Image (tube, rainbow, N blue to C red):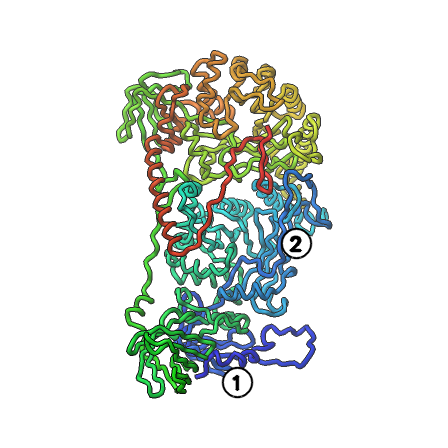
Amino acid sequence: MKKIFTLAACLAWGVAGSVLAQETFPRNGVYDERPGLVVFTNATIHTDYKTTLENATLLIRNGKVEAVGTAVKIPAGAVVVDAKGKHIYPGLVDMFSSYGMPEVKRSTRNWMSPPQMETAKQGAFSWNQAIRPETNAAELFKVDAKQAEELRKLGFGAVLAVHPDGIARGTAALVTLAEKRENEVVVLDKAAGALSFDKGSSTQDYPNSLMGAVALLRQTYLDVQWNSQNAGKEQNISLKAFADAAKYPQIFEAGNKLNVLRADKVGDEFNVQYIIKGEGDEYQMLPQIKAAKAPLILSLNFPEPYHVEDVYDARRVTLSDMKHWEMAPANAALLQKEGITFAFTAADLKDKKDFLPNLRKAIQFGLPEEEALKALTATPAKLLKAESLVGSLNKGMLANFLITSGNLFADDNIILENWVQGNQYKITDVFTDVRGVYTLKMGQQPERKLLVEGTPAKPELRVIGPDTVKGKIAFNGSLVTISFTKDKKSTESIRLSGWLNEKNMQGEGKLPDATDVKWTALYSAALTQQAKKDAEKKAAPVAYGPMIYPFAAYGTAALPQQETVLIKNATVWTNEKEGKLENADVLLKNGKISKVGKNLSESGARVIDGTGKHVTPGIIDEHSHIALNGVNEATQSVTAEVRMEDVVDSESINIYRQLAGGVTTSQLLHGSANPIGGQSAIIKLRWGKSPQELLVEGGAPFIKFALGENVKQSNRNNATIRFPQSRMGVEQVYVDAFQRAKEYDQVWKSHNKLSKRAQANTPAPRRDLELETLVEILEGKRFITCHSYVQSEINMMMRVADQMGFKINTFTHILEGYKVADKMRERGIGGGTFADWWAYKMEVKDAIPQNAGLMSQVGVVTAINSDDAEMARRLNQEAAKSIKYTGMSEEDALKLITLNPARLLHLDERMGSLKPGKDADVVLWNEHPLSIYARPEKTFVDGIVYFDAERDLQLRADQERERMRLTQKMLAAKASGEKTQTPANKKTTVLHCEEHEEEEGTSYLAY
C-alpha cells in the first residue's frame, strides 16, 4: 500500500486549482484544472461527534466530500491513500476569532483630555461611533498565512472572523483557513451579527460606563424599529445595517458571568436570543446561566497558578481567584451536565499552543470527549446555520478534516495533517506511531531487541543486547535514522539509516569497525499489554474544592434558608406606637414578621435567646453606591436612560460587610456628574443571590438628580465643552429637559388617542428612553433623589419643580437643609443627610451637625445615609449623633436609619418597623443599638440569616483552611513545572456619588 507521506508531491498537483476555482479571475500562464480526487482508505473516520466508522473510506473531489463509509467505490484516477491506523475527524470550527481582521486601536483618551461630544465619523451613520453595524468583516478580511498556520496546527479548518470593534460591530464572516485568495476562502460573507458592551476604538465620550453601553444598545434597538417603520424620515446607514444584521445569528461578546446575564437581559427585552461569548467563569452562576437559555462560546483560557511562596504575595491573591484557578477547567463539564449548549474558542489565549492541552484538561475535569468534539464541530456549525458546510463529514460538505495518529483528545495524539477545502496542510512529518517492540537484525550480528518508547512525536530508543543502552531514533517523513553504542562500555556508535514500511524498518548502516551492513527492524508487539491498557484507561475526573455562593470571600457552599425563628426576651424597638418593648419576643415566619409581643410560642420554630440583647428593624441606607460596576455616566448633562440595576455587582464584598453592620436594604444611586443622572436600584442585601434577585420586588422607581460643583464640572480638567458650565446653566438644563419631555408626552398622547385603525396606518413616534423616564417623573410614577448642598440651588430646584409640574421626593446630602426645611415641609420633600460631614469642599462650609435634628423638628422626613461603603457599616452610630447634637430621642434617632428612609423610598408598608405583616428584615444586636459598642449578632433579610457573628468566625477559619489547601496545590503545580503568574496589584475603590469612572479605568474623587 502507498503511504500518504510518499504522496505529498502527487497530492499537491492532485488538488491544484480544484476548490472554489477563481473562475472570474484571469490567469497568467497555463491552465491546469484537475479534479482534486483523493481517497483515504482503512481509516477510523469520525463523520460527526457521535458517529465513528472503522476501516472506512473517505472520498473527496473538488474540495468537497463526495462519499464516506465502509463500502465506498473508488473511482478511476483517484489518488489512494492508505490511512490504516489513523483517525480522521471533521475540521474544527472556531466561532469567535479575529483572524484576518485589521488590528483595533483602542481609544487612548482619558479624563484629562477635552471631551468629544459628537461622532467624528463622517457620513449618514449613527450619532455614536461605537454603533458601527455597517461594518462587514468580509470586506475587511485578508488572508493571513501566519495566523492560518497557527490555527490549523490546533485543528481548526474554519473560523468566524469577527471585527472586535464597538458595541454594534456589524456582520462576521465564516472563512476557511486555506491559503488562497480571499474570495475563495470566504464561505459565508454574512454569517452572524456581532455585538458587545465595549465601545472599542470610539473616541466619543458617550458611553463611558457599562450602564451607558447597555442604554445605548437598548436605544439603538428602538431606533432601528422606528427607522424601519418611518422610511424617508431619516436616512441612517447604521440603523439600516443593524436591521440587516439582525437576520443572522447574533453573537454577543459579553465577558464575565454577570455581563453574560446583562447581555441576555437586553436580548430578552428585544426578543433576540444571543449566542454569548463569556470569560470562562460561567460555572460560578450556573442556575442563572442555565435559566438564560443562551448558547455560549466558552474560552479555554485557564488561569495559571500564582506565585505564593511568599506569604505576603499569597495574601494578595483573593480566595475567588484561587478557587477559579482550580475550578476553571471544570467550567465546560459543569455546563454540559446542566444541558447548556456551548462551543469552544481559542480566543483569549495568550499562547494559542495552550488550546489543545487546555481542552484535554477540560476533559480530565469531567467533560465527555464526545461533547468536546461536538463543541468544536457540530455546535458551532449549527449555531451559525452552516451545518451543511462544516462540522461533519457528510456528502457535499467542505473537505475540511484532520488526520491524527490516534484519539484526538489523547495526550500523545498528534495532528498529522489538516485538510482545508481539499488542500493538504502537513502539521507534522510523523505519520505512524512507531512505538513498540522490534527485532533488530544487522548483517551477521546477533539479534537485538529495540524498544521504541516515548511519544509518537518524540520517540525514544532502548536497545537490549548484552547490555541495555539508550539510543536515538528520528524520522523525516518515511526516512529513519538510528544510532546507539554496542554496549555500555563502548563509546563508538552504530549508525543505521533507512525507511519505514508500515511499522517495519529496513535500510543500510555502518558498524564501529566501518563494516557496511544491511539491517531490518521488524515490529513484534506493543510495549506491554499493561502499557496499552494504561493508555486506554479513562482517568477519573479531577477533584476540586466546593462551589461557594457567592463566588467570593465569605461565600458558602449552600445558601442560608428561610426558617421560622422566635427571638425571646429581648428589648424590641418596634418603631410603631408600641415603642420600645422590654423582655419581648419577635416571631419571624415565611419571610415576614408574624408576631411581636410577650410570651410568644411557635411549634417548630428555632428559638433564639435574646436576653440582654436588642432587636431592631434592619437599617435602610437611602443613599449608597456599593455593589455597582461603575457609578457615573458622566458624559452628558441628561442621562436618565441609564439604569443602576444594569450594573449591580452581587459579589461585592461590601454587601457582606454592611450586613455585618445591620444594613438590610440600600438604594444604589447614580453619581452626581450630571444634572439628571441615572435610574436608581433598590436592593436587599441577599448575600449569594444574583443581581436580579437582589432587587426589591415592586419597589418604587427612583432617579438621581444633582446640583452644585460636580454637574457644572468645576472639578474636572479640560471640561469646558459640555453644557452646563455654571449654576445658572444647571437650571436651564432642567427646564429644557422637562419641556422636551412634555412635548414628547403630548406627541405620544396624540398618537394614542387615534382609533386603532388610524394607529395601524400611522407610524408610532420614536421612543426615547431618556424622555420616557422624565415623563414618568411628570406623571408621578418615578421619584427624584436630588444631590444638593447650597441653599440657593435648593431653592432654585424647588422653583423649577413648581414651574414644570413635578415633585422632588428627597434632597440628599442637603447639608444646608436646616435653612430651607420649612419650604421642604410645605412641598412634602424629605431629606437624606450626613450626621457630621463638613469642610471637605466649599459647598459644605455652612454644614452643621444639628442639620438632621433641625429638619426633623420642622417636620421634614429625615434620614441619615452613607454615600460611603465604610460609613454604612456604622450608620447606627451616625444616627446616635443626633441625640448628642440636638437632644433627639433614642427612638427617633433609630428611625433616621430605619423607618424614615423606608418612608422616603415608599417602602414603609413593607419595612422600617417591626410590625406584623412587614418583611422580616431584622437585626439582633448584642446591646443597645445606638451604642458605639453595639454589634449585630444576626442580620435577617426576609427571615433568612444572611449574617451571623458566630458563623462569621467559622467562615473565616474555613476560608483560611481553603486558602492553605489551594496554596499547597499551587506550590505543587509550580514544582511540577507549570507556568505561574505574579499576583496583580488590584485597586480597591470606595465609590462615592462624586467619583467619576473613566473609560481608561482611572478614577478620581471630586468632593
Figure check: 383 above or below 921: below
* Amino acid type indicated by mark 2: Glu
One can see residue 859 in this view? no
The crowding category of the residue bearing disc 2, from other C-alpha atoms within 10 Å (few below 14, some 14 to 19, many at least 20), is many
Location of mark 1 (residue)? 77
Decide: is 74 above or below 347. Answer: below
Residue 298 point in image, percent of width and height: 47, 54
Q: Position of residue 288 (x, y in %)?
A: 44, 45
90, 356: nearer the viewer: 356
Q: Choose between 401 and 562: the one closer to the eye.
A: 401
| Residue in the foreground of this view, choosing between 534 and 982 | 982
The amino acid type found where label 1 is placed reads Gly
Do the residues under discs 2 and 1 have CB atoms within 8 angstroms?
no
Residue drawn 48% across the image and 58% down it: 344
The residue most toward the left is: 603
How packed is label 1: few (under 14 Cα within 10 Å), some, or many (20 or more)?
few
Residue 538: x and y, percent? 33, 62
Which quarter shows the C terminus? top right
622 and 625: which is toward the camera: 625
**Marks 2 and 1, Cα distance to the nearest angstrom?**
48 Å
Disc assigned to residue 110: none
Q: Is residue 164 visible?
A: yes
Q: Is residue 430 above or below residue 660?
A: below
Secondary element under disc 2, as helix, strand or loop, is loop
Vertical side of 101 occupied by 116: above or below:
above
Circle 2 residue: 134
Q: Earlier in the sequence, mark 2 or mark 1?
A: 1
In the picture, residue 118 is in which quadrant? top right
Q: Residue at x 49, y 41 (%)?
A: 986
> Is the N terminus in the top left, top right, bottom left or bottom right quadrant?
bottom left
Residue 630 placement (x, y as % from top left): 55, 38
